[in-house]
Amino acid sequence: MSERENILGRIREALKVPAPLPGSHDDMSVHASAEAPASHAREWLPSVGASVAEQFDLFARNCADLKTDFQLFANRDELKTALAKIAAAEKWQRVASHDGELSNFASRSLGLPVLLTDQGYDVQAMEKCDAGITECDALIAQTGGVAVTSRSAGGRALSVLPPHHVVIARREQLVADLPAAFALLQAKYAPDFPSMISFITGPSRTGDIERILVLGAHGPKKLTIFCF
């Protein structure tokens, strides 16, 4: 028997075993003694620290590793000053944003033309914006990532098209780990989930060509997180 016949024979044998229906893998009636893997996730996920201060420290270290600019402020005045500084340094002419309490404060404080995504927009006009300013659902200490959805971050494109993505967050939006982030999204949106849920970990990057890291290949070249 040839190797080809051996492979095809194994495939035919495997096809005799019916596959479980989607969503039935953790069906307790089928696996009486099974427990959902997520219930044990924290046993093998990295430690995040017990206190909020430790978790902020971990988040900051992870952001540095990911080439994310993370800045923690005491109040809105410090946030406003930092926004003005970065806008002047990068010579921003126009920004894109969405309707939200934090995003409105940030974009209006700059005194620049603002493209809002809430009432429809021209994609080419957004691509010409120097930065996209969004809110988020959570900051994740364990990964240094940001959880965003199409509802919390002004749609699908706002965090992707402009070359600099600026996230405005509150301190209380920090969660310890990924299980906490998924639980937050479940509690906030179920059963009517947004059309897009994304976890952003640093600016867009690729290392496909000779393993040389290139930022901005498929999205923003810069990610800045301002938190107060």
Image: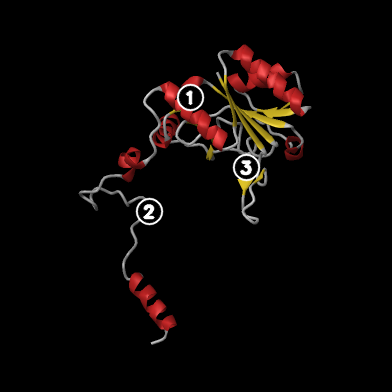
Tell me which colouring the rendered structure shows: secondary structure
Placement of the C terminus among the 4 image quadrants? top right
Q: Nearer the viewer, mark 1 or mark 2?
A: 1
**Kind of residue sitting beneath label 2:** Pro
Is residue 179 left or right of 199 when viewed as pictured?
A: left
Residue 45, position as x, y percentages in the image: 38, 40
Label 2: few (<14), some (14–19) or many (≥20) C-alpha neighbours in 10 Å: few
User: Residue 137, can we see it?
Assistant: no
**Mark linked to residue 22:** 2
Going 70% across and 31% down the picture, which residue do you hit?
Answer: 131
Report the residue marked by disc 3. Answer: 204
Is residue 195 left or right of 186 when viewed as pictured?
A: right
| Quarter residue 150 falls in | top right
Placement of the N terminus among the 4 image quadrants? bottom left
Report the residue marked by disc 1. Answer: 173
Label 3: few (<14), some (14–19) or many (≥20) C-alpha neighbours in 10 Å: some
